[in-house]
């Protein structure tokens, strides 16, 4: 995949919105990868937590908003505790989710899961899914 990175993308209102909603400075991340190395859900993600931050830094919103990883994140905060720069990565991921939810888009509709599927989902994922619509 070839992507055109430009000043226009980096200055995109999407980048500002993610920073505003998350309260984080995206450019503070220097891509050490510690967040990805400690993430318990990384095996289920299509892009890693540090790649989520990188896509957000570069204003690559289409690629970021289409990723499954933002929905896989269970908001366990492991990435936050591992970050040497003190970036709250889980909040950045939550901000991206919120942007999509404000457009009434979700990756998974819990009500459409069968009883067997719900039994296999970690409880924190269900709680997180429901929380998205109550805050």
Image: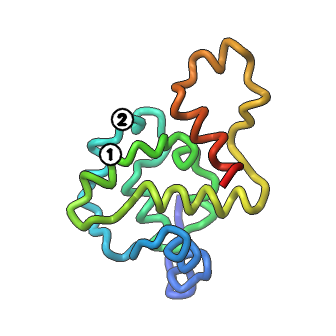
- CA gap, disc 1 and disc 2: 8 Å
SS for dot 1: helix
Where in the figure is residue 16, as x and y percent of width and height?
Answer: 54, 80
Q: Are marks 1 and 2 in contact (CB under 8 Å)?
A: yes
Check the image and name the residue furthest to the top: 116
Where in the figure is residue 109, as x and y percent of width and height?
Answer: 74, 36
Disc number lying in front (1 or 2): 1
Residue at 63% across, 40% down = 129
- Could you say which disc has been placed on residue 40 in the image? 2
- Whether residue 134 sits left or right of residue 58 in the image: it is right
Where in the figure is residue 29, as x and y percent of width and height?
Answer: 31, 69
Residue at 20% across, 62% down = 84
SS for dot 2: loop
Residue 118 against residue 52 in the figure, above or below:
above
- Whether residue 82 sits left or right of residue 60 in the image: it is left
- Whether residue 40 sits left or right of residue 1 in the image: it is left
- Could you say which disc has been placed on residue 78 in the image? 1
**Image quadrant where residue 95 sits:** bottom right
């Amino acid at each position: 995949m070839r992507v055109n990175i430009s000043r226009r993308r980096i200055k995109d209102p999407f980048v500002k919105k993610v920073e505003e909603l998350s309260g984080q400075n995206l450019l503070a991340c220097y891509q050490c990868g510690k967040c990805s190395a400690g993430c318990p859900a990384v095996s289920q993600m299509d892009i890693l937590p540090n790649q989520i931050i990188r896509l957000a830094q570069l204003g690559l919103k289409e690629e970021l908003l289409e990723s499954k990883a933002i929905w896989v994140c269970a908001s366990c905060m492991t990435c936050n505790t591992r970050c040497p720069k003190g970036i709250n990565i889980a909040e950045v991921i939550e901000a991206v989710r919120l942007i999509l939810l404000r457009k009434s888009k979700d990756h998974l509709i819990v009500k459409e899961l069968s009883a067997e599927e719900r039994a296999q989902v970690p409880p924190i994922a269900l709680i997180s899914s429901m929380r998205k619509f109550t805050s």
